[in-house]
Amino acid sequence: MKFKLIVFTVLLAVVLAFVYQNSVPVAVRFFNGEYVLPFALLLMVVLAVGVLLGMLLVLRRQSYNRKKKTAKEAQQKVAAATAASDAGHAGQDSVTEPLAQETTVVTGEDHESNNTDHRGNSRVW
C-alpha cells in the first residue's frame, strides 16, 4: 500500500511539473471555432482521446474474436456429434456390440423454425 502511494505521489509531481512548464496558452482551430487553452491541457486531451480510441478498437477486436471462437466451438460440437452418430451406425452391424445412442444437435441455421424454444413453447407473443 505504501509503495502505491509513493508511485502515485511521484507521478502526480511529474504531471504537475509538466502542467506548470507547459501552461502557455495556444490557439486551436477546430471546425469553425478557435479555442485558446493551455498547451498541457491540449496534450492531455489528445492523449485521452487516443487512449479511448485504442480501448474501443481493442474491445471491438475482442468481441469479434469471441464471436468467432463461439462459432468455431459450435461447429466442432456438430462435427463431434456427427462423428459419434456415424460411429454408432457402423457398430450396429455387429450383434455383440450394444446399440449406440444417437445424439442430434440442432442449431439455429439447421432448425426449420426458430419461433419455438426447446420445450416446444412459442417465443412469439
Image (cartoon, rainbow, N blue to C red):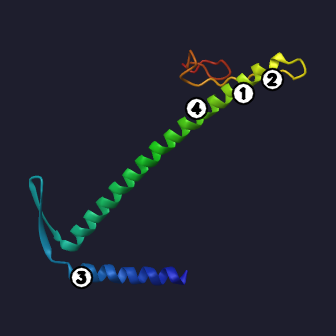
Of the residues under marks 4 and 2, which one precedes in the sequence?
A: 4
Q: Do the residues labelled 4 and 1 touch (CB within 8 Å)?
A: no
Q: Residue type at mark 3?
A: Tyr
Residue 47 picture quarter:
bottom left
What residue do we see at 12% from left, 52% from top?
Answer: 31
Of the residues under marks 1 and 2, which one precedes in the sequence?
A: 1
> Could you tell me how far apart the alpha carbons at marks 4 and 2 are, in whole angstroms?
22 Å
In the figure, 55 relative to 3: above or below? above
Of the residues under marks 3 and 4, which one precedes in the sequence?
A: 3
Q: Nearer the viewer, mark 1 or mark 3?
A: 1
Which residue is the site of mark 3? 20
Q: Are marks 1 and 2 in contact (CB under 8 Å)?
A: yes
Which residue is the site of mark 2? 100
Of the residues under marks 1 and 3, which one precedes in the sequence?
A: 3
What residue do we see at 81% from left, 18% from top?
Answer: 92
Which residue is the site of mark 4? 75
Of the residues under marks 2 and 3, which one precedes in the sequence?
A: 3
Of the residues under marks 4 and 1, which one precedes in the sequence?
A: 4
10 Å crowding of disc 3: few (<14), some (14-19), many (20+)? few
Q: Do the residues labelled 3 and 4 touch (CB within 8 Å)?
A: no
Which residue is the site of mark 1? 84
Position of residue 88 measured from the top left corner of the image (x, y, whole percent): 77, 23
Q: Residue type at mark 4?
A: Gln
Q: Residue type at mark 1?
A: Ala
> Could you tell me how far apart the alpha carbons at marks 3 and 4 are, in whole angstroms?
59 Å
10 Å crowding of disc 2: few (<14), some (14-19), many (20+)? some
